[in-house]
Amino acid sequence: MKTIYLAGGCFWGTQKFFDRLAGVRNTVVGYANGSTENPTYEQVKHGSGHAETVKIEFDESVIAPEKLLELYFLTIDPLSVNRQGEDSGVQYRTGIYYTDESLLAAIESVVKAQENAVGKPLAVEVLPLENFFCAEEYHQKYLDKNPGGYCHIPKSLLNMEIK
């Protein structure tokens, strides 16, 4: 099992998207790489510096880290700074955070391929994880609990068959 942390704007849709993938064993939404311990959603909204992030535990014998990251890039606008869909603010920045150095080569490879595809540097942070705090329970699996909830990821992408 490997763990990676992906910030892709609002974490509700990002979690929903990755929960569907074969090989993803667990996801948890939370707040990463900010300046305060155990922030609340209100603190994150008002400038704690954390990014809404999904902790993804996956079996790399089922889904390679490169494939996981290629799919991540389908769910974001990699050139947008502190904004995805209708959500704006530093908490909605995009980022790939890691605690396992063995994932860095895959991360760098996919990011470089994406930069080559768009022809300019991406607005996606690639950093070691500094901290991660679980979000409040009502945020966990939010779109399962609230199927009509807002999501910046198009429904067609959330429903697409992934091989």
Image (cartoon, helix red, strand yellow):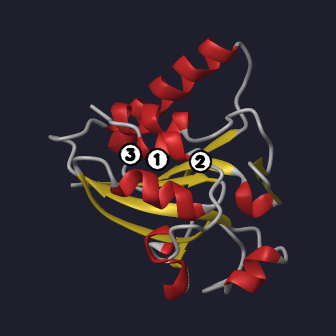
Local secondary structure at mark 2: loop
Query: Given contact means CB atoms under 8 Å apart, are the residues at marks 1 and 2 in contact?
Result: yes
- Mark nearer the N terminus (1 vs 3): 3
Label 1 – label 2 distance at C-alpha: 7 Å
Q: Which residue is mark 2?
A: 153
Label 3 – label 2 distance at C-alpha: 29 Å
Q: Which residue is mark 3?
A: 101
Residue type at mark 1? Leu
The answer to whether 36 is drawn above or below residue 101 in the figure is: below
* Rendering coords of residue 151 (x, y %): 62, 57
Q: State the quadrant of the C terminus.
A: top left
* Label 1 Cα crowd, 10 Å radius (few <14 / some 14-19 / many 20+): some
* Rendering coords of residue 131 (x, y %): 55, 70
- Mark nearer the N terminus (3 vs 2): 3
- Mark nearer the N terminus (1 vs 2): 2
Residue type at mark 2? Ile
Query: On the rendered structure, is 31 left or right of 47?
Result: left
In this view, the residue in front, 23 or 127, is 23
Query: On the rendered structure, is 6 left or right of 121?
Result: left
Q: Residue at x 46, y 47 (%)?
A: 158
Query: On the rendered structure, is 114 left or right of 46?
Result: left
Q: Which residue is mark 1?
A: 158
Q: State the quadrant of the N terminus.
A: bottom left
